[in-house]
Image (cartoon, helix red, strand yellow):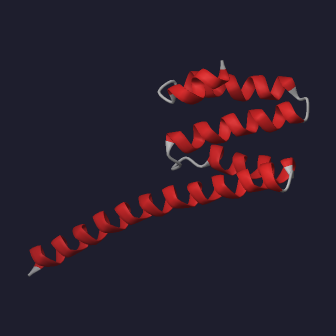
Amino acid sequence: MKTIRHLHVVLFLVTFAFLADHVAAQSTGDLLQQALYAEEVEGDLDSALKIYGQIIQNSSAPPNHVAQALYRSAMCAMKTRDEATARVMLEKLVTRYPNETELVEKAR
Protein backbone atom coordinates (compact mmCIF):
# COMPACT_ATOMS: atom_id res chain seq x y z
CA MET A 1 0.00 0.00 0.00
CA LYS A 2 2.82 2.39 0.88
CA THR A 3 4.58 1.55 -2.37
CA ILE A 4 1.47 2.40 -4.39
CA ARG A 5 1.10 5.69 -2.52
CA HIS A 6 4.75 6.55 -3.22
CA LEU A 7 4.28 5.64 -6.86
CA HIS A 8 1.28 7.98 -7.09
CA VAL A 9 3.29 10.80 -5.54
CA VAL A 10 6.17 10.23 -7.96
CA LEU A 11 3.82 10.13 -10.95
CA PHE A 12 2.12 13.31 -9.78
CA LEU A 13 5.45 15.11 -9.41
CA VAL A 14 6.66 13.98 -12.82
CA THR A 15 3.40 15.08 -14.43
CA PHE A 16 3.51 18.41 -12.62
CA ALA A 17 7.12 19.02 -13.71
CA PHE A 18 6.22 18.25 -17.33
CA LEU A 19 3.19 20.53 -17.29
CA ALA A 20 5.08 23.35 -15.57
CA ASP A 21 7.74 23.15 -18.27
CA HIS A 22 5.08 23.25 -20.99
CA VAL A 23 3.30 26.25 -19.41
CA ALA A 24 6.61 28.13 -19.10
CA ALA A 25 7.32 27.58 -22.79
CA GLN A 26 3.86 28.81 -23.73
CA SER A 27 4.07 31.87 -21.53
CA THR A 28 7.41 32.98 -22.97
CA GLY A 29 5.99 32.40 -26.44
CA ASP A 30 3.01 34.54 -25.52
CA LEU A 31 5.34 37.19 -24.13
CA LEU A 32 7.31 37.21 -27.38
CA GLN A 33 4.09 37.79 -29.31
CA GLN A 34 3.09 40.62 -26.97
CA ALA A 35 6.51 42.24 -27.26
CA LEU A 36 6.53 41.98 -31.05
CA TYR A 37 3.08 43.52 -31.19
CA ALA A 38 4.17 46.38 -28.92
CA GLU A 39 7.31 46.91 -31.01
CA GLU A 40 6.03 46.49 -34.55
CA VAL A 41 2.34 47.44 -34.43
CA GLU A 42 2.11 49.93 -31.59
CA GLY A 43 5.62 51.33 -31.92
CA ASP A 44 5.95 51.18 -28.12
CA LEU A 45 9.61 50.30 -27.79
CA ASP A 46 9.70 50.83 -24.01
CA SER A 47 6.95 48.27 -23.44
CA ALA A 48 8.55 45.87 -25.89
CA LEU A 49 11.92 46.17 -24.15
CA LYS A 50 10.34 45.47 -20.76
CA ILE A 51 8.69 42.33 -22.07
CA TYR A 52 11.84 41.15 -23.85
CA GLY A 53 13.67 41.72 -20.55
CA GLN A 54 11.20 39.44 -18.75
CA ILE A 55 11.95 36.68 -21.22
CA ILE A 56 15.71 37.18 -20.97
CA GLN A 57 15.57 37.04 -17.16
CA ASN A 58 13.32 33.94 -17.09
CA SER A 59 15.63 31.05 -16.19
CA SER A 60 13.09 28.49 -17.44
CA ALA A 61 12.57 30.14 -20.83
CA PRO A 62 13.56 28.01 -23.83
CA PRO A 63 16.91 29.08 -25.31
CA ASN A 64 15.36 29.99 -28.67
CA HIS A 65 12.94 32.38 -26.92
CA VAL A 66 15.76 34.04 -25.00
CA ALA A 67 17.84 34.33 -28.16
CA GLN A 68 14.90 35.89 -29.99
CA ALA A 69 14.33 38.32 -27.10
CA LEU A 70 18.00 39.33 -27.15
CA TYR A 71 17.89 39.92 -30.89
CA ARG A 72 14.64 41.92 -30.76
CA SER A 73 15.98 43.96 -27.80
CA ALA A 74 18.99 44.83 -29.89
CA MET A 75 16.73 45.90 -32.76
CA CYS A 76 14.74 48.13 -30.38
CA ALA A 77 17.99 49.65 -29.16
CA MET A 78 19.04 50.32 -32.75
CA LYS A 79 15.72 52.06 -33.41
CA THR A 80 16.43 54.42 -30.52
CA ARG A 81 20.03 54.87 -31.72
CA ASP A 82 21.42 53.19 -28.59
CA GLU A 83 24.16 51.33 -30.41
CA ALA A 84 26.09 50.42 -27.25
CA THR A 85 23.14 48.53 -25.79
CA ALA A 86 22.41 46.90 -29.13
CA ARG A 87 26.01 45.71 -29.34
CA VAL A 88 25.87 44.22 -25.83
CA MET A 89 22.65 42.35 -26.61
CA LEU A 90 24.00 40.99 -29.89
CA GLU A 91 27.26 39.89 -28.24
CA LYS A 92 25.26 38.01 -25.58
CA LEU A 93 23.24 36.36 -28.32
CA VAL A 94 26.32 35.26 -30.26
CA THR A 95 28.26 33.99 -27.23
CA ARG A 96 25.46 32.39 -25.21
CA TYR A 97 23.31 30.96 -28.01
CA PRO A 98 25.63 29.89 -30.85
CA ASN A 99 23.23 27.09 -31.81
CA GLU A 100 20.62 29.67 -32.83
CA THR A 101 22.41 29.92 -36.17
CA GLU A 102 19.87 32.03 -38.05
CA LEU A 103 19.77 34.71 -35.35
CA VAL A 104 23.53 34.58 -34.82
CA GLU A 105 24.02 35.12 -38.54
CA LYS A 106 21.71 38.15 -38.45
CA ALA A 107 23.51 39.45 -35.37
CA ARG A 108 26.85 39.39 -37.12
Quarter of the image for residue 67 reads: top right
Q: Position of residue 39 (x, y in %)?
A: 79, 49
Q: Quadrant of the N terminus?
A: bottom left
Say which residue appears at 78% left-offset and 46% top-offset: 49
Left or right of 103 on screen, residue 81? right
Residue 97 seen anywhere in this rendered image of the structure: no
Q: Position of residue 18 (x, y in %)?
A: 35, 61
| Rendered view: 3 above or below 53 | below
Kindly give the residue lying farthest to the front in the view shown.
Answer: 41
Kindly give the residue lying farthest to the right in the view shown.
Answer: 81
Say which residue appears at 48% left-offset and 63% top-offset: 23
Q: Position of residue 12 (x, y in %)?
A: 28, 72
Residue 65 seen anywhere in this rendered image of the structure: yes
Say which residue appears at 66% left-offset and 17% top-offset: 108
Left or right of 41 on screen, residue 81? right
Quarter of the image for residue 8 reads: bottom left
Say which residue appears at 54% left-offset and 28% top-offset: 102
Kindly give the residue lying farthest to the bottom in the view shown.
Answer: 1
Q: Position of residue 14 (x, y in %)?
A: 29, 63
Left or right of 9 on screen, residue 52? right
| Rendered view: 53 above or below 26 | above
